[in-house]
Image (cartoon, rainbow, N blue to C red):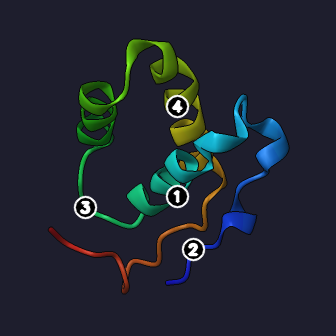
């Protein structure tokens, strides 16, 4: 599975620099790790002033990313 930045509509990002977190959202659809774990990692690593916009970027990536193919879904 190739996940490209074009999978995310950057016009919907509050901050264009959050594209990397949106891409994590896309990736998270393909890994067998609960969404809450991803969000906890963001909360633990981002300063409070950047957290809300990055959580929104993550959600956007999860929404717009390519759907997982059951055969290629990675298991952790």
Please report whichever mark, 3 or 1, sits nearer to the chain's N-terminal start: 1
Residue 17 vs 47, above or below: the answer is below
Please report whichever mark, 2 or 3, sits nearer to the chain's N-terminal start: 2
Q: Which mark is residue 3?
A: 2
Between marks 2 and 4 in the image, the one whose residue lies nearer the viewer:
4
Please report whichever mark, 4 or 1, sits nearer to the chain's N-terminal start: 1
Question: Mark 4 touching mark 1, by CB under 8 A?
Answer: no
Q: Nearer the viewer, residue 49 or 43?
A: 49
Residue under label 4: 54
- Left or right, 61 with reference to 16: left
Between marks 4 and 1 in the image, the one whose residue lies nearer the viewer:
4
Give how far apart the Cα atoms at labels 3 and 4 are.
21 Å
Please report whichever mark, 2 or 4, sits nearer to the chain's N-terminal start: 2
Give how far apart the Cα atoms at labels 2 and 3 are.
16 Å
Give how far apart the Cα atoms at labels 4 and 1 are.
13 Å
Q: Position of residue 2 (x, y in %)?
A: 55, 82
- Left or right, 20 with reference to 39: right
Residue under label 1: 26
Residue at horizontal 44 percent and vertical 62 percent from the top: 27
Between marks 3 and 4 in the image, the one whose residue lies nearer the viewer:
4
Query: How packed is label 2: few (under 14 Cα within 10 Å), some, or many (20 or more)?
Result: few
Question: Mark 2 touching mark 3, by CB under 8 A?
Answer: no
| Quadrant position of residue 8 | bottom right
Q: Nearer the viewer, residue 47 or 21?
A: 47
Q: Which mark is residue 32?
A: 3
Please report whichever mark, 3 or 4, sits nearer to the chain's N-terminal start: 3
Secondary structure at numbered mark 1: helix
């Amino acid at each position: 599975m190739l996940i490209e930045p074009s999978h995310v509509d950057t016009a919907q990002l509050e901050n264009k620099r959050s594209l990397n977190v949106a891409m994590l959202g896309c990736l998270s659809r393909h890994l067998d790790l609960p969404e809450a774990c991803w969000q906890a990692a963001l909360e633990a690593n981002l300063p409070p002033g950047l957290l809300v916009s990055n959580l929104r970027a993550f959600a956007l990536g999860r929404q717009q990313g390519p759907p997982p193919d059951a055969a290629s879904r990675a298991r952790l």
